Image (spheres, grey):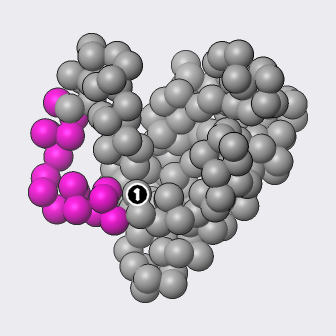
Amino acid sequence: MSRHIKNKILSIPFLKSLFLIQNEWHQHGVFLHTLRVTYYTLKAKDFKLIPAALLHDIGKPFSAFKKDEDDIIYGEYSFTDHEEVSYQIIKKWPFISEYTKDIVRYHYLIRDIKKSKKENYARYEIKKAIWESLSDEMHEELERFLLYDDLGKGKKRR
């Protein structure tokens, strides 16, 4: 599998993040969030993105961890590089298109670029180079998918 996978399927972080709680930005666990993202993708009749909606966070429960004091205080999780974990899980699945695999792999890239520019300039440079290597069409697809992903988050927890 991937070197990023930290949690086994029956571990507490896996199950809690899947069904109950993610972080301050998500009202719901990964499972319900995924259903919500899929709903908003269907509602927009953006059928090409439905497989990505279903798979984009498949690696999140495997990568859930307590990153800082806030995660501990609020009982929440961080999911650093969860999109790469998701991609690693599906990359050899022959029934998934390369397009969907790319959306899954890069679905957090826009947000990661903005965040890392403030917090980790070396990471920003890497993520920016990845963005620049993608086509204009993929940029548009990722921007649209980010909208559905954000709608799927629900209310901010705190």
The residue located at (38%, 19%) in the rendering is: 119
Quadrant position of residue 123: top left
**In the picture provided, is 39 more to the left or to the right than 17?**
left
**Res. 1 visible in picture:** no
* Quadrant of the snapshot with the C terminus: top right
Q: Vertically, is 140 above or below 12?
A: below
The residue located at (30%, 59%) in the rendering is: 143
Q: Vertically, is 72 above or below 95?
A: above
As drawn, the residue found furthest toward the front would be: 158
Residue 35 position in % (x across, y down):
66, 67
- Span colored in magenta: 129-144
Residue 13 position in % (x across, y down):
79, 31
Magenta segment: does it hold 137?
Answer: yes
Q: Nearer the viewer, residue 61 or 91?
A: 61
Q: Name the amino acid type tagged 1.
A: Leu
The residue located at (37%, 31%) in the rendering is: 115
Residue 11 position in % (x across, y down):
85, 29
Per the image, label 1 sits on a secondary structure element best described as helix
Q: Residues within 10 Å of mark 1 (few under 14, many from 20)?
A: some
* Quadrant of the snapshot with the N terminus: top right
List the residue tagged with mark 1.
146
**In the picture provided, is 36 more to the left or to the right than 148?**
right
Quadrant position of residue 47: bottom left
Magenta segment: does it hold 16?
Answer: no
Q: Vertically, is 19 above or below 70?
A: below
The residue located at (48%, 74%) in the rendering is: 41
